[in-house]
Image (spheres, rainbow, N blue to C red):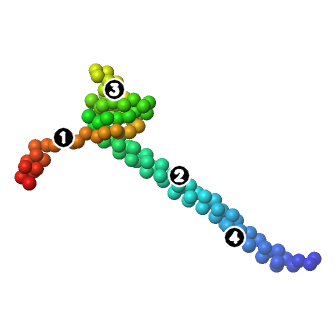
Amino acid sequence: MLISPAYAQAAGGAAASSSFIQFVPLLLIFVVFYFLLIRPQQKKLKDHRGMLEAVRRGDRIVTNGGIVGLVTKADERELTVEIAENVRVKVMRDMIHSVVSKTEPVSSDKDKADAKSE
């Protein structure tokens, strides 16, 4: 009977604040993972999607299998790639790893007229 009931009730209130403090390291770990892993991966994925959408005829590409070729026809979902003289294969657009060299966009007659006027 050395401890009064009032002291025992006060100890229960301190446990609620200590449980919050125990979750703070977990929250910090999630924040670190977000900025070091998740966010850069999302940015890389967005850049790759933009690159895939910009592929057009005349670009030199590298496929995921390591085949280097020249895009001869670009459809919405697949590309026709010339990997050797008179050897053409169809490749899904999603299977492109990178674009080695881009072709210049075809200039319209309006662009040519603007260049001459300058």
Q: Nearer the viewer, mark 1 or mark 4?
A: 1
Query: Does residue 110 appear in the picture of this structure?
Result: no
Q: Are marks 3 and 2 in contact (CB under 8 Å)?
A: no
What's the distance in space between the residues labelled 3 and 4, CA to CA? 66 Å
Residue at 29% of width from left, 36% of height from top?
Answer: 59
Q: Nearer the viewer, mark 3 or mark 4?
A: 3
Residue at the disc numbered 2: 37
Q: Amino acid at mark 2?
A: Leu
Left or right relative to 8: residue 92: left
Spot the residue most to the left.
117
Residue at 32% of width from left, 24% of height from top?
Answer: 84
Left or right relative to 57: residue 113: left
Residue at 38% of width from left, 43% of height from top?
Answer: 49
Mark 2, residues whose alpha carbon is within 10 Å: few (<14), some, or many (≥20)? few
Q: Element under label 1?
A: loop
What's the distance in space between the residues labelled 3 and 2, CA to CA? 36 Å
Picture quarter with the C terminus = bottom left
What's the distance in space between the residues labelled 1 and 2, CA to CA? 39 Å
What's the distance in space between the residues labelled 2 and 4, CA to CA? 31 Å
Left or right relative to 118: residue 56: right
Residue at the disc numbered 1: 106
What's the distance in space between the residues labelled 1 and 4, CA to CA? 66 Å
Question: Sequence-wise, which precedes: disc 3 or disc 2?
Answer: 2
Q: How far from the left and from the top, in percent, is residue 18?
A: 71, 68
Q: Amino acid at mark 3?
A: Ile
Q: How far from the left and from the top, in percent, is residue 51?
A: 35, 43
Residue 33: quarter of image? bottom right
Q: Amino acid at mark 4?
A: Ser
**Numbered label attached to residue 17:** 4
Query: Does residue 47 appear in the picture of this structure?
Result: yes
Question: Sequence-wise, which precedes: disc 1 or disc 2?
Answer: 2
